[in-house]
Amino acid sequence: MIAIGGSAGSLPVLAALLEQLPASVNATMMIIVHRLKNVVSDLDRLLSFKTPIIEPDDKETILPHRIYLAPQNYHLLVENEDAFALDYAEALHYSRPSIDVSFASVAAVYGPRALGILLSGASKDGAEGLQSIIAAGGTGIVQDPESALFDTMPRAALELCPEVLPMSLDAMVHFLQEFKISATHDQ
Amino acid sequence: MKDIDNEELDVLVSLIHRQYGYDFSDYAPSSLKRRFLRFMDHAAIEEVGELTSRLQQDAVFFERMTQFITVNVTEMFRDPLFYRALRELVLPRLATYPIIKIWHAGCATGEEVFSMIILLREAGLLERCRIYATDLNALNLDKAEKAFIPLKCMKDYTQNYQQMGGMEDFSGYYTADHEHAIIHPTLRRNVVFFQHNLVTDQVFNEFQLICCRNVFIYFNRQLQERVLRLFYDSLAPLGYLTLGLKESMLFSGEHRRFEPVSAAYKIFRRKN
């Protein structure tokens, strides 16, 4: 499972990342971006390049090779490897969806097969979640703070967790291609 | 971050069931774990073992925890377009009944009930309505009965109301003190709040409309299916049921006994 979190300034990077990914990334992706609630949003369509993005319903089955987007005003959790779960509990870091919440649940379910990526953002959401992913044996990446429009989020993760790998957009795309290979070898 | 594994969760859940009679065994584990962790954080408890032994010894401590276990987050006019759909698709049908009975299941602190009241009032239906609002959490119901809404939320709620297409002056529906907006008592005359547990309690009336938004997400599929059956049995023929925008009944065989009125806004109707 590849979980990508972002906030202010993350959408251009996220769009570029999704656009440049090979069509055959051999993993499921879930994207958690801070977004407004109670307004009509086309974010799912805006981020649909090669693969249409799905905003999952509660308890929706997780299908391989799909890209999922946390719906507005819900936390997105994975119940187990087969199903998502939504949660309408308190916002964390003033955010629902919260990246920490999703990352922690991905860490618990996928352990070493989790990859967390944290992009530009002006909050500290996601740092603890990325730490959980790494503690569970998974991999953590942040957008290189120098290239991030808002560097608070990647810097918070780097401070909390030195194992996190800072990467440029190109490096991330390259890494995800490699991730595909290692995931294939696991199966 | 701390975590609770599945075995620890089972021990907690069966202890609570045995000792206090609340059955959380069919709650969705991922969110239930988060609730326990949140309470542990609040009570400065480090280990799940410590939580278990405190619960065994201290009923007051358990009462304190129940306030944390249930999710009490709610908003007025959450998903404004849902309320618009309700007004356009459902209220005209409800208007044909001499008495309209509505059940808000899992009403938390009442914000969705107050939204409904305003909608019904503007449609000229409020006087004919009997609204039953239930929740598992007694403290929530105390708050709901007072109709105190944090004043700092009212700006958001006013925007939601306007997006929904509300035409009145929203501030005309409440008075304010330093911290709260208080919905006018005259608007709340036909509402009763009381405790009801969707897991264990039964049908208690027959309704033209049941609202249960963002409650199902805390249940596993088996419990969702059971509660869906309870709702079917509690609805008058052709009565309406609304769920949260991201809640689905498609996984359940029960969905065949309902027809969608608006798939996008999760408004369903009991078949005859």
Image (cartoon, coloured by chain):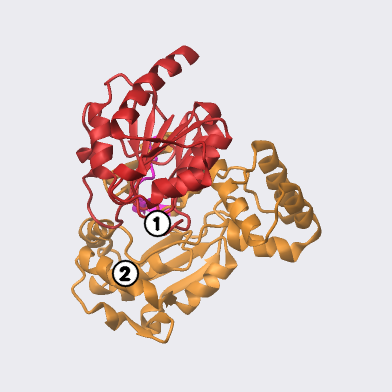
* Labels 1 and 2 share a subunit: yes
Residue A111 lies in quadrant: top right
Which residue is tagged 2?
A: B157
Chain letter of disc 1 in the image = B
Spot the orange chain and give its letter.
Answer: B
Q: Mark 1 sits on what residue?
A: B210
Judging by colour alone, the chain drawn in red in this rendered image is A
Q: Say which amino acid is labelled 1.
A: Ile
Residue A54 appears in the picture as rendered: yes
Secondary structure at badge 1 equals strand
Of residue B18 and residue B218, the one placed in the foreground of this image is: B218
Name which residue type carries label 2.
Tyr
The N terminus of chain A - image quarter:
top left
Residue, far front: A146
Q: Position of residue B33 (x, y in %)?
A: 59, 46
Give the side of residue A148 with respect to residue B104, left or right. Answer: left
B246 lies left or right of B22:
left
In reply to whether residue B246 is colored magenta, the answer given is: yes
**Residue at x-position 46% and y-position 43%:** A102
Tell me if B154 is positioned left or right of A103 in this view.
Answer: left
Question: Pointer 2 indicates a residue of which chain?
Answer: B
Residue B168, given in percent of the width and then of the height, sits at 21, 77
Is residue B51 or residue B99 the one in the foreground?
B51
Check if residue A165 falls in the magenta segment. no
Q: Quadrant of residue B163?
A: bottom left
Q: Is residue B222 visible?
A: no
> Sequence-wise, which precedes: disc 1 or disc 2?
2
Residue under the point 72% across and 49% down: B47
Residue at the spot x=27%, y=65% of the render? B160
| Residue A43 vs residue A127, the one in the foreground | A127
Part of the protein shown in magenta: B235-250
Crowd around label 2: few <14 · some 14–19 · many ≥20 (10 Å): many
